[in-house]
Image: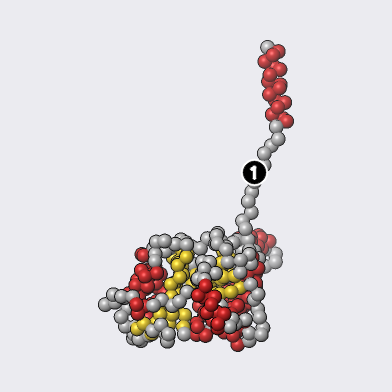
Amino acid sequence: MEAGKRKADDSIGRDEKRPKSKKQWQVPRRNDHGGVQAKAIQPGDSGIWATCNKGREGKCVGELQNLFTEYAEFLYGSTLDAGDSKGDGTEMPDAADIESEIQAEVAGIRKPSAVQLFTSIRPHVQCVVFFKTASPIEPVSFVKKICEDAANNSALKRTRFTKRLSPMTLMGRPSVDDLGKIAAEVLAPHFHQQPIRSRKFAIRPSIRNHNTLNRDSVIKQIASIVGPDHTVDLKNYELLIIVEVYQNICGISVVDDSFERMKRYNLAEIFDPTPKEVMNKAQAASEEVEGAIDESADIADLEAQPMGLS
């Protein structure tokens, strides 16, 4: 009997000495403005790819976050102010009505915070970052404005680590079906508005770390969606269709003929132009410098490809 009691006492003693384990709570990662950072690019997103030198991804994100925020306030200030003030026009309750005051305060606490206009995403690749954008940001016109200002005043250098910006109007999965869906949506305002206006166009696909879609199939599929009412012109295009395919995501945008004049939206080249002879040698030597986004890719040679347009 005593032996059993001693065993029970020993067991109790061991339980008392056993350290209590604490649950490990993980705090969601947040960006510089307090918004939870996205983990991956999702179909339906829009945004901006950016390239930089190896090991400078963090600094690139920092300087672009500041630059993008400044331009958003400049370009969309009134829209942003209207969005922030929406729903704030209700009358305040009487000071004596304590219950109503408390309810109003609780409602204010529960009110969701403002949508983050720019959310940085770090893909698993060196030299590349992505900024997911939210309305009212329109990636193509937004990036064009930044590059125009840089070209008009290149002495006022705003970035040190950023190279090329590549706006993406719509993102999707890199499959034949999804590519067709997002292409139809992105291309419609430029090529399919009634009455049809014939446009000269070119297609520039860039495919990295992906083996399902290939350059030729992308060109043919996009050209078939553009339709026979428009003509290919590689050197004097009016509209350039940019297709970026990387790993498990793809994106499409349409830019105008200022793209080449703006150094293909390469801020580093706008601020510090590389001499032509050096540029030609660099392009001939390597196509892989920029990793996921191919900065030196030639415009797709559509004339050499049977389009099958009918």
Q: Going by the image, does 60 lie left or right of 228? A: right
Within 10 angstroms of label 1, few (less than 14), some, or many (20 or more) residues?
Answer: few
Residue for point 72% across, 26% down: 13
Q: Quadrant of residue 115?
A: bottom right
Quadrant for the N terminus in the image:
top right
Above or below, comparing residue 247 to residue 87 in the picture: above
Q: Going by the image, does 282 lie left or right of 216? A: right
Residue for point 45% across, 67% down: 207
Q: Quadrant of residue 34?
A: bottom right
Colour scheme employed for the rendering of this structure? secondary structure
Looking at numbered disc 1 in the image, what kind of residue is underneath it? Lys
Q: Going by the image, does 164 lie left or right of 11? A: left
Q: Is residue 85 visible?
A: no
Q: Position of residue 89 (x, y in %)?
A: 60, 73
Residue farthest to the top? 1
Residue under label 1: 23
Frontmost residue, 102 versus 286: 286
Residue for point 47% across, 80% down: 255
Above or below, comparing residue 257 to residue 119 in the picture: below
Q: Position of residue 32 (x, y in %)?
A: 65, 65
Q: Position of residue 94 (x, y in %)?
A: 67, 67
Frontmost residue, 71 versus 83: 71
Quadrant for the C terminus in the image:
bottom left
Q: Secondary structure at mark 1?
A: loop
Frontmost residue, 236 versus 33: 236
Residue for point 53% across, 66% down: 291
Q: Is residue 55 visible?
A: yes
Q: Position of residue 151 (x, y in %)?
A: 59, 85
